[in-house]
Image (tube, rainbow, N blue to C red):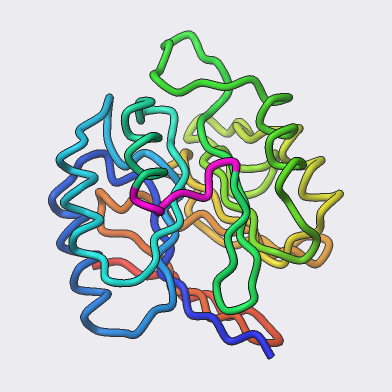
Amino acid sequence: MTDVHLLVCSDLHGSNKALNVLRNALEDDAFDAVVVCGDFTTNGSPKYVKDFLAQVRVPVLGVPGNCDTNTIVDLLAKAGASVHGRLVDIKGLKFFGFGGAPPSPYGMPFEVEEATMAEKIRAVGVRGGVMVTHTPPLGMNDLSKGGCNMGSKALLDVAGELRPRLALSGHIHEARGETVSRGTVFVNPGPAKEGYYTKIHIQQSIRVSMCRT
């Protein structure tokens, strides 16, 4: 039987507060892995990511956010801490994902067309696993302050095809929450830079605990 305990976070944006919050959470509980749904940094600080990885003593499964750079993508891959375009097994549970966000008027460092995101996830994804993205699927914890759904239709389609048990994303800071749709639990842990993270225990069912320090 699957029994996996995860610490899930997103949108650290180079914040020392985020590092302190996550370090304390790791000291207080035993986790099988830490999942990071992108935006480790804002325009890239390799030292910050290296410090983060040095403080985490369990496997890290990360994808880049739209504010991360290719240097960060390469650093995560070389450290064995990436699920970006990869399939990773933790205690028999399959994790797969792809980071970045669709092109915007702001020209952020890591922007990717939605169709490319979907293609890359289909290439590595499996049914019933855990899908990790930075951009949320459309309608799944993606409501902006202005009341618009900011998620990806292509990622929603992929989720419908692969039916992951759990789909993790960030990006829309104010859309922190949990949504269940068609058997998939969708979670946005909220921005770690503001002290938010989530604990998720996966057995026959999935238990989600939204946390803030």
92 left or right, relative to 208:
right
* Residue at image point 74% right, 32% down: 119
The quadrant of the rendering that contains the N terminus is bottom right
Q: Quadrant of residue 164?
A: bottom right
Q: Is residue 143 visible?
A: no
Q: Nearer the viewer, residue 45 or 104?
A: 45
Above-or-below relation of 52 to 106: below
* Residue at image point 65% right, 65% down: 94
Q: Is residue 157 visible?
A: yes
Q: Is residue 97 magenta?
A: no
Above-or-below relation of 7 to 112: below
Residue 83 horizontal/vertical position (percent): 52, 50
Q: How many marks?
A: 0
Residue 107 horizontal/vertical position (percent): 43, 11
Q: Which residues are magenta?
A: 79-85
52 left or right, relative to 97:
left
The quadrant of the rendering that contains the C terminus is bottom left
Q: Nearer the viewer, residue 98 or 86?
A: 86
Q: Main secondary structure of the magenta part?
A: loop
* Residue at image point 83% right, 61% down: 182
Residue 209 horizontal/vertical position (percent): 47, 76
Residue most extreme to the front: 78
Residue 105 horizontal/vertical position (percent): 48, 8
153 left or right, relative to 64:
right
Q: Quadrant of residue 139?
A: top right
